[in-house]
Image (cartoon, rainbow, N blue to C red):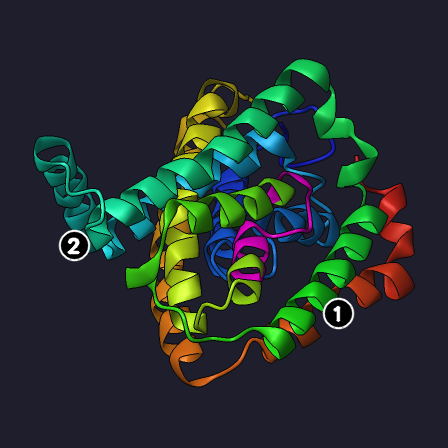
Amino acid sequence: MPLVASSAPLPLAEACWHALVLGIVQGLTEFLPISSTAHLKVVPVLLGWGDPGVAFTAVIQLGSIAAVLAYFRMDLAEVGNGVARAFRHGQWRDPSAQLGLAITFGTVPILLAGLAIKVLVPDYENSPLRSLEAIAIVSIVMALLLAVAELVGGRRRRIEEVTPRDGLLVGLAQTLALIPGVSRSGSTLTAALFDGWNRADAARFSFLLGIPAITLAGLVELKAAFGSVQNGGVIPMLVGIAAAAVVSWLAIAWLLRYLQQNSTWIFVVYRLLFGLVILLGFRGLAEIAP
């Protein structure tokens, strides 16, 4: 899981600098519907650092999880209380309990899909799906799907109306995020818009739904990432996680405010341009990507 194509370890200061930059990239892109995995693949290749790899990508997301846990701490406490009341008194129709069930139902598909990949595709890190061309094509396809969802979505439903069925539907879309370039927040936001949610509540549920999946993905890769000598070991990884946490908090706050008054067209355009630039302008980068 090197931050550079070379197998030689980086000096500590340089490794910290790489981790800081990639932590900022992670924070900016994890919750915006533009794919953090794609940017963590493309940006270091553009900078000549090489692909940071699956382990680094997964672990640095723990910073984003810290941010979303802190930002939505009151919501999560209410969900926990709602589920506890439901177990004690059978009040499963309570909106907080329904939200807890929706998150649970929505997490199952990506856990099963991730486990299947671990077992059946052991060399997934070097899969053709992680190539720059594949990321570009996927980015364009997902941009088009988000555009259609923006056009046809009813935008009337609120998070207080969420059901386990909604969680499962959006959770199935979340499994697509295992493909680099899809964007977990992008696929879940798109599915929620198709399901008739308003934009801000669709994003809010997307954030909450991502907590279990992203946390587990980071924990699974924790030992491999911290044990890597190529990226400088523990200190640079902590730098990256801290940077991701701070920037993720700012990105969450901005996106929720933005979607209260604005559409998702800015992200549609960005994703189209992102994909086209890679396909048309940076084909040669594939030769330097490890």
Residue 215 placement: quadrant = top left
Q: Residue at x 62, y 48 (%)?
A: 40
Predominant SS along the magenta part: helix
Q: Residue at x 72, y 26 (%)?
A: 124
- Quadrant location of the N terminus in the rendered image: top right
Q: Is residue 263 left or right of residue 167?
A: right
| Residue 234 in the image, given as x and y percentages of width and height | 41, 27
| Residue 259 in the image, given as x and y percentages of width and height | 43, 76
Amino acid type shown at disc 2: Met
Res. 217 visible in picture: yes
Identify the element where label 2 is drawn. Answer: helix
- Is 182 contained in the magenta span? yes
In the rendered view, tell whether residue 247 sits above or below residue 45: below
* Magenta extent: 177-190
Q: Which residue is mark 1?
A: 272
Res. 11 visible in picture: no
Front-most of residues 160 and 272: 160
